[in-house]
Image (spheres, rainbow, N blue to C red):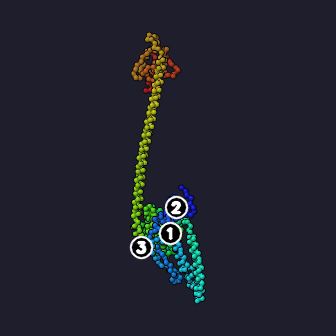
Amino acid sequence: MERELSPQNTEKLVQFQELSGIDNLNRCIEILERHNWDVETAIHDHLGLDPREVTQPVRELPVFPLQNGQITINRPVRQQSLHRPQPVDSIFQRIMTFFSNTFFDDNMGLWPSGTNQRPYGFTGWLLFISSLPLRVIMVTVYQFTHFVFRIIRPEHRPAVTDPTGNVVSFIQEYNQTFGDPHPTFYPGTYSQVLNEAKKELKFLLVYLHCKDHQDTNKFCRQTLCNPEVIEFINGNCLMWACSVDSLEGYRVSQALRENTYPFLALVVQREFRMTIVGRIEGFVEPEGLLQRLRTIISDNEAFLVAARADREERSFTQALRQEQDVAYLESLRADQEKEEKKRRERLLEEERLREIRELELAEERKKEEMIKKKQDAIMQVPPEPAADETGICRILIRLPQGQKLERRFHRTIHTLKDLYYFILSHPDSPYQFEMATSFPKRTLPWQPGMEITPTLAEVGLGASEALLVLDLDA
């Protein structure tokens, strides 16, 4: 079912789909509608994040410049809190950023930041001090206006058009800056690595890189390049890294809501969805990182074991079902072949019976025709002449089955036709036959349908003859 979405909702849908790794558009729309199109809440719910969980936020305290106008920042101070800290772009952090940037940033022009900009002599210092209130007012008005404008209209970043390019560019820049020794970074988008971790049933370690943070260089040069760290991460996790300055990294940052940098999040499939099971924020030594990762992986390994067992069971069930289907299809094919063979045999038998029936019918028709011919032949047999008449020919006829017939015919009056019909009229005579003399053996040339009917004398029969009847159907 197609749905009409506004341009804003379409952009949110694309952002949520890239972050969650869900390919089904209808499912993404249902999740976003359930959370009133709030991408952050929907992602937190999908990743299993609880906004009420106890966290340890890190607050960085700015201090006054020390020497040569260089600003130093104290090490992160951890505080216990019962509430989730405000996001990176919250109003509270904007207010703190506003005041710190206004009065303590050397780029604002309130304080001399270099040797060339320092006042020279008493007159220079007098002019600098006298103009300081005016400059404070101007900078304050400018910063306050900019601050209000940012609250009313927060920073808007365009949609990610090439997330893979963002990740590949970061990996290349990281290698150029810190060198090749580091865990293997997955060269794909966040949604792709989520799907890969879900497919391979592995832990996913997400690293968000902020090049402007004071601990980033030390973390990359001391911790990530450590051989033991590299070996452990490559052997137990998939690792995905991206800079928060890129659109892909910024979008993932908005979903994970990190408090400080360096930031690591460990994600694993838990109850059929990808869930964040550990967060490591701030600088950490290699030994500490390994200990934290081992603890988190050990505490959550059972979920992967259960997922693997469930997948193996489903694979076994599917394979068993496939084997059963193959066996069923094979049995069905064998039954079909048997049925087809029986059908062919039945058709052949029916054809054979039909042919036999046709032959029987043809034989019956032939018999009926011959019976009729025999009946007609009786009517055509001339009367037998008396024994004392002259020109008599006494003929002894032997049938194929051994019966003997004897009759007198006129040699000059009676023809072969008369002799033929006499033989045919006998019940034991064959239906089709030829007449032949016994010695010397010769065939008498007459069959029904011939127009020429020679007399017995013309064919050479004497006063006494013996004839044989030859069955043409035998």
Tag 2's secondary structure? helix
| Precedes in sequence: disc 3 or disc 1 | 1
Q: Picture coordinates of residue 327 (x, y %)?
A: 41, 49
Q: Distance between the residues labelled 3 and 1?
A: 24 Å
Which is more toward the observer, 356 or 251?
A: 251
Query: Is the C-beta separation of discs 3 and 1 under 8 Å?
Result: no
Residue under pointer 1: 253
Snapshot quadrant of residue 278: bottom left
Which sits earlier in the primary sequence, circle 3 or circle 2? 2
Q: Residue at x 43, y 11 (%)?
A: 387
Compare residues 192 and 378 and report the one nearer the observer.
Answer: 192
Q: Is residue 366 above or below residue 149?
A: above
Q: How crowded is mark 1: few (under 14 residues within 10 Å), some or many (20 or more)?
A: many
Residue 33 - label: 2
Amino acid beneath label 2: Glu
Q: Residue at (57%, 62%) from the top-left corner?
A: 7
Q: Which one is nearer the viewer's eye here, 227 or 304?
A: 304
Three-letter code, disc 1 = Ser
At 47% from the left and 63% from the top, the residue drawn is 46
| Whether residue 50 can be seen here | yes
As helix, strand or loop, the secondary structure at mark 3 comes to: helix
Q: Is residue 28 visible?
A: no
Determine whether 146 is above or below 16 in the image: below
Q: x, y (%) of residue 262? A: 47, 72
Q: Do the residues labelled 2 and 1 touch (CB within 8 Å)?
A: no
Within 10 angstroms of label 2, few (less than 14), some, or many (20 or more) residues? some
Q: Which quadrant of the view contains residue 294?
A: bottom left
> Dot 3 corresponds to which residue?
288
Badge nearest the viewer, 3 or 1: 1
Of discs 3 and 2, which sits in the foreground?
2
Q: What label does residue 159 carry, if any?
A: none
